Image (cartoon, grey):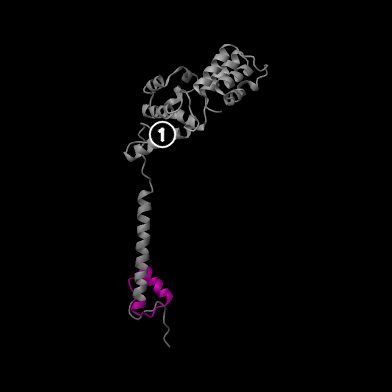
Amino acid sequence: MPSWSIAELELLRSGVAAKKSMTEISQDIYDKLGSQRTAKACSQVWSRNKEPRGEWTDDKVERLRNTLKGTGTTALRRAYYSGIRDLVGEELADMTWQQIEEKSKELTRPPDCVSVVSLCQNKPPGVFAEQKLPNIPRLRYSTASARRRAGRPTNFGQNIQSKPSSNFLWSKLLPGFMVLWVMITFYRLFRIFALGKDASIGGWLYQIFFQSELPEGDSGVSRVEL
């Protein structure tokens, strides 16, 4: 569902209060704001209702109120978790930007809230511009990056310490042992070939794994005297 401007919310609310039909509210929005986008989107609130369209019941008004509280694109919904959940929807329609900024200071994460408000202040009052919404999630990520660079926890106050892996020692020592074993193996092979030992493959393997070097004249195989 698209984002709502304060002007659209005011027309929608006044239409509900005056018990106007959806057609009349849509026409008011179009005549005064030149926008049918919101009117068409909010018609989904009661289009599935079995009652005749345009007939405002308490149930429809309650649905509309709940819809307004949940209005927003994915980016705006992410912004809710950055601390402006209470500043969108129905409550936003009755507040100026100054009031929003003051209220944002009372929330749990005021830096994020004030930054979101400052993004929207560059637009006409009361409009969460769609081109501004993609910037809102970046506030959370940029704040996390700044906290990470400063060595502070990135989860907004909850200090979760990472537990060292139980395989840390093994994962560090095993490669060292492997490298050492390969170096010793090549060193022993080099000594065998460099000294010109007359040894069979079996003798080489026996020397590599069990002896420093073969005894003089021992080829690693039994000799039969004729």
Mark 1 surroundings within 10 Å by alpha-carbon count, few (fewer than 14), some (14 through 19), many (20 or more): some
Circle count = 1
Residue 80, percent across and down? Answer: 46, 28
Residue 188, percent across and down? Answer: 35, 71
Q: Is residue 100 above or below residue 212?
A: above
> Is 200 contained in the magenta span?
yes
Residue 90, percent across and down? Answer: 50, 19
Query: In this image, 107 relative to 14: left or right?
Result: left
Residue 171, percent across and down? Answer: 38, 52
Write down the quadrant of residue 220 in the picture: bottom left
- For mark 1, give the secondary structure: helix
Write down the quadrant of residue 62 in the picture: top right
Residue underneath mark 1 = 139
> Is 128 contained in the magenta span?
no
Which one is in front, 86 or 14?
A: 14
Query: In this image, 27 relative to 72: left or right?
Result: right
> Quick one: quadrant of the C terminus?
bottom left
Q: Which residue range is magenta in the image?
A: 193-214
- Residue shown at 37% from the left, 56% from the top: 174
Query: In this image, 14 relative to 200: left or right?
Result: right
* Mark 1: amino acid: Leu
- In this view, the residue farthest toward the left is 150
Q: Is residue 152 above or below residue 23?
A: below
Write down the quadrant of residue 138 in the picture: top left
Which one is in front, 190 or 205?
A: 190
- In this view, the residue farthest toward the top is 18
Q: Is residue 116 above or below residue 151?
A: above
> Quick one: quadrant of the N terminus?
top right
